[in-house]
Each structure stands twice: as C-alpha cells, then as structure tokens.
Image (cartoon, rainbow, N blue to C red):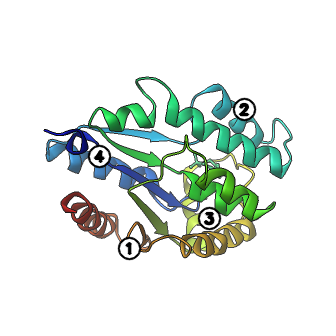
Amino acid sequence: MNKEAMTGKLIVFEGIDGAGKTTQIRLLEGYLKEKGRPVVCTAEPTDLPSGKALRRALSGEEQKTPCELAALFTLDRIAHNIQPEVGITALLKNGNDVICDRYFYSTLAYQGAETDAEWVRSMNLNCPEIRHPDLCIFLDLLPEESMKRINRRTETREIYETSERLERVRAQFHAVLQTFDPQSVRIVDAARPIDEVQAEIRKIVDSLLQS
Ligand code: TMP
C-alpha cells in the first residue's frame, strides 16, 4: 500500500446544539468499523488544557471576550491536530479515519458572529497546523426543535443554548457553509427519524470513500 492509500479521512460533524451529532457519529463509527476501517472519534473543545479552559468559559465560570474565545478555540484546534500519537494529524497518517464532533466551521459560525468574522476565518483556514477536513456533515435543525431536544436532555445551559442565539448561529452556519466547496460540505436535514438521517450520511460517506 502506498503512503497516500494509508491516509485516513477526516470527517467533521457540525450543527447547532441538540441536532443529534452524538447519535449520528456513534452510528457512523459502527458502520465504518463494520467495513473494517480503523476509526477514532474525537471532539472539540478537547480534553486538553485549552479545551478545559473553554469549558470553563462556556459554563460562564470564567469570563472571556469574543476575541479571547475565538483565539482559544483556534489554539485548542491546533493542539488537537499536532498532539503526538493521538492528534488528528498522527491518527490520519497512521491510516485511521477520524470523526470529529465540531471543528473550524463552529468557530466561524459561533465566534464569527460575535467578532471580526474575517479574522476568525483567516486564523483558522490559513493556519498550517489545522488540517482541512475531507468532509463536513452539517446536521440541520430548526432552533425550536433543537431547544426541545436540549430541554429533554439536560438541566444545565451552556452560554449558547438560548433559542434566539441558536437562530443566529444557524443562520451564521448557513452563511459560512456556502463559502466552502459544496462537495466537501453537506447539509443533512436532521429533523427526520434517526435511521433516515444515518442512511443519508452513509451514502455521502460511501461516495467520499470511493473518490
Ligand atoms: P458541544 O455542545 O458540541 O460539546 O460544544 C460545546 C459548545 O461550544 C457549543 O455550544 C458550541 C461551542 N463551540 C464554539 O462556540 N466554537 C467552537 O469552535 C466549537 C468547537 C464549539
């Protein structure tokens, strides 16, 4: 097998909170494993020190400005990429597919809406230590439905979990996603039953693996 063939794919899931990323990622992981592909699931914010600082900020425990948040998410992403052995770059190089729950599209949508969007975009897309995904799947859901799911799931609210804010973030996500190659960024209607959503995701991933 040549070096190119050994490289795995980086597949990112995005969506507003409550869109069903966790469930769909778990099902896709099972599917890829059944196909005999080594796969590692990961998420941002990470469990690294930068990710822990982000969690404290998201819970409201520590105040951060929009620019600080944007920079910290980007720093966390760099650390996520370059960590030895378990970082995204190393995992892909060793032939694993990597499924990541959130990536730079989230920073562009959430932080881009709160500060200078061009600065946030450039910091992420032009960073040599942040890999560009092979595929981004955006699970699209109306904020009202997403709030219902969030309320069923948990008592605690993170700072982005209010309906008006989700509405703004969803609009921002759509604006951001339009600026990427439509082949690599796919919008999937997440209001449908879990199995239907997963079937569409598998089709999209199959065509990526064949390309
Ligand atoms: P999670 O609920 O998917 O774990 O994500 C935690 C929160 O972090 C979620 O409300 C979205 C937010 N977030 C950003 O604002 N910017 C980012 O770059 C990422 C990765 C997440």
The residue wearing badge 1 is 192
Which of disc 1 and disc 3 is earlier in sequence?
A: 3
Residue 90 picture location, percent across and down: 39, 31
Q: CA distance from mark 4 to mark 3?
A: 26 Å
Of the numbered discs in the image, which one, if any, rests on residue 160? Answer: none
Q: Secondary structure at mark 1?
A: loop
What residue type is disc 4 on? Glu
Crowd tier of the residue under label 3, counting other residues whose Cα lies within 10 Å: few below 14, some 14–19, many 20 or above = many
Q: Nearer the viewer, mark 2 or mark 1?
A: 2
Which of disc 1 and disc 4 is earlier in sequence?
A: 4
Which of disc 2 and disc 4 is earlier in sequence?
A: 4
The N terminus: image quadrant:
top left
Q: Secondary structure at mark 3?
A: helix
Decide if ligand 1 comes within 8 Å of the CB at mark 3.
no
The residue wearing badge 2 is 53
**Nearer the observer, 206 or 200:** 206
Of the numbered discs in the image, which one, if any, rests on residue 29? Answer: 4
Q: As drawn, which residue projects farthest toward the top?
A: 84
| Above or below: residue 205 compared with residue 43 | below
Q: CA distance from mark 4 to mark 1?
A: 20 Å
The residue wearing badge 3 is 147
Q: Secondary structure at mark 4?
A: helix
